[in-house]
Amino acid sequence: MPSSEQSIDKRPWLLLSPSLMAITLLVVIPMAFILVYSFYENIDLAVDKVAFQFGNWSEVMTDGYYRIAIWKTLRLSVIVTVLAAVLGYIPAYFIAMTKFRDKWLLLLLLILPFWISFIIRTLSWIHIFGNQGALNGLFQLLGLTDAPLSLMYNEFTVIVGFIHVFLPYMILNIYVSLEGIDENLEPAARTLGATPWQAFREVTLPLSMPGLAAGCLLVFVLTGGSYVTPLILGGPSDFLFGNLIYDAIVTELNWPMGATLSFTLLLLLGLVVVLYSRLMGLNQLSKAFK
């Protein structure tokens, strides 16, 4: 009898073992290597010395340049997340509530951008905002300007590029949450005297919060870890923390510093997930997809 109880207790671990093994091999061990490498000492270009010193960490903690990059990354991530939430809720609500018979076509149009390369979608904005782009061509055609306007390589274009790439993630999360709400709740609220806005505010919006929160977390983390969009659409002062990692590893060939910066970004974004867990609860993520 005791042996059967012990076998029952081990069953969850046996079922979880493939996932735990994959996480260990693909996440834990690589991150452990990065952490160890952050204590190495860079001697010359791509020449590192095996050591256990805190010089890289001390530089990251004390150099104001890195603090500015962290502040810019967090600020831009918040801006992109808020704009994506506001812009994404409207189409998600429309798709969820529409009576259109072939709703799958709307979802297909929403997923269609994922079939195009992330870099190509980002580069497309050069043909819109560039000196020879569509907007400048339209302005000159209408006689509004005599010379091309400088619309590229600033924070605005970086924000536009981020929203263009990450908005579908927000819409999908909100849509899944809205789709799970009983469609009779809003009409019931209206029969009880609520206006359409009151029914939405008191019924639909609170019930869709798990999807909205999950979308915000996803967009924030993806924005904070990106470097391609600022690299293509931003100017010299529009760098994010991911750009510093890219420069340290690819340009300067200072791999210990790149490892230090990578682990620092991991800790920052991990802290955001922990705060989300404390405020919302990670179980809200699963509710968003039910």
Image (tube, rainbow, N blue to C red):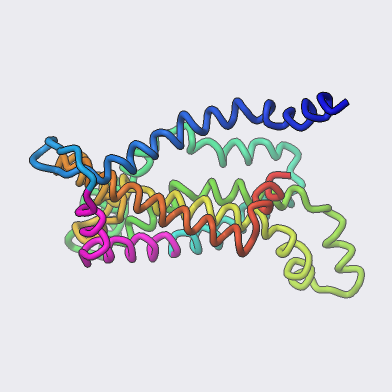
Q: Is residue 207 left or right of residue 126?
A: right
Q: Is residue 70 left or right of residue 101?
A: left
Whether residue 72 appears in magenta in the rendering, the answer is yes
Q: Main secondary structure of the magenta part?
A: helix
From the image, which quarter does the C terminus lie in? top right
Residue drawn 47% across the image and 48% down it: 166
Residue 238, x across and y down, in percent: 26, 59
Residue extending furthest toward the front:
2
Residue extending furthest toward the left:
44
Residue 219 makes an appearance in the image: yes
From the image, which quarter does the N terminus lie in? top right
Q: Nearer the viewer, residue 165 or 136?
A: 165
Q: Nearer the viewer, residue 40 or 86?
A: 40
Residue drawn 52% across the image and 33% down it: 23
Q: Nearer the viewer, residue 122 or 38?
A: 38
Q: Is residue 153 left or right of residue 104?
A: left
Q: Relative to 77, does residue 164 appear above or below in the rendering?
A: above
Residue 140 makes an appearance in the image: no
Residue 128, x across and y down, in percent: 32, 49
Whether residue 274 appears in magenta in the rendering, the answer is no
Residue 63 placement: quadrant? bottom left
Residue drawn 28% across the image and 65% down it: 67
Residue 121, x across and y down, in percent: 38, 41
Q: Which residues are magenta?
A: 53-78
Residue 71, x across and y down, in percent: 33, 66
